[in-house]
Image: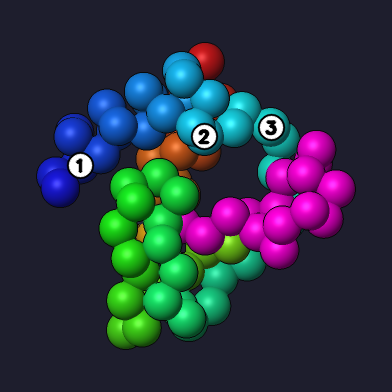
Amino acid sequence: MDASALRLLIKQKLQDGRLPHSSITRVWSGPSDGETCDACDVRITKDQSVTQVTLADDRGARPGLPFHVVCFHLWDVERCAE
Ligand SMILES: [Zn+2]
């Protein structure tokens, strides 16, 4: 998926609620354990880094949302743009 298609998908997900607008309380990166990216729905392979995000209103219900590094940055830009 190229960057403009990815940006469009993330915009759509923000609009229909599949991706949150919530503020982020914690972001950290580490080696992937085969998670699926919340933005592009593609598996993050073990040779890639995963960016894990904890949301202000998530109250620890989930350990964090996994994103590709690039997907996280696109989501963060679009989230703040709306
Ligand atoms: Zn992704």
Across and down, in percent, residue 26 comes to: 73, 56
Any mark on residue 3, and which? 1
Q: Local crowd at mark 3 within 10 Å, few (<14), some, or many (≥20)?
A: few
Quick one: which residue is furthest to the right in this view? 59
Q: Local crowd at mark 1 within 10 Å, few (<14), some, or many (≥20)?
A: few
Left or right: 82 in relation to 2: right
Any mark on residue 21, and which? none
- How is the model colour-coded? rainbow
Across and down, in percent, residue 7 comes to: 29, 33
Q: Is residue 61 above or below residue 76?
A: below
Q: Is residue 82 above or below residue 57?
A: above
Residue 5 in sight here: yes
Type of amino acid at the residue the image marks with label 3:
Ser
Any mark on residue 19, and which? 2
Type of amino acid at the residue the image marks with label 1:
Ala
* Labels 2 and 1: the sequence-earlier one: 1
Residue 45 occupies quadrant: bottom left
Q: Which is nearer the eye, 45 or 61?
A: 61
Secondary structure at numbered mark 2: loop
- Is label 3 within 8 A of ligand 1 (CB to nearest ligand atom)? no
Across and down, in percent, residue 78 comes to: 45, 28
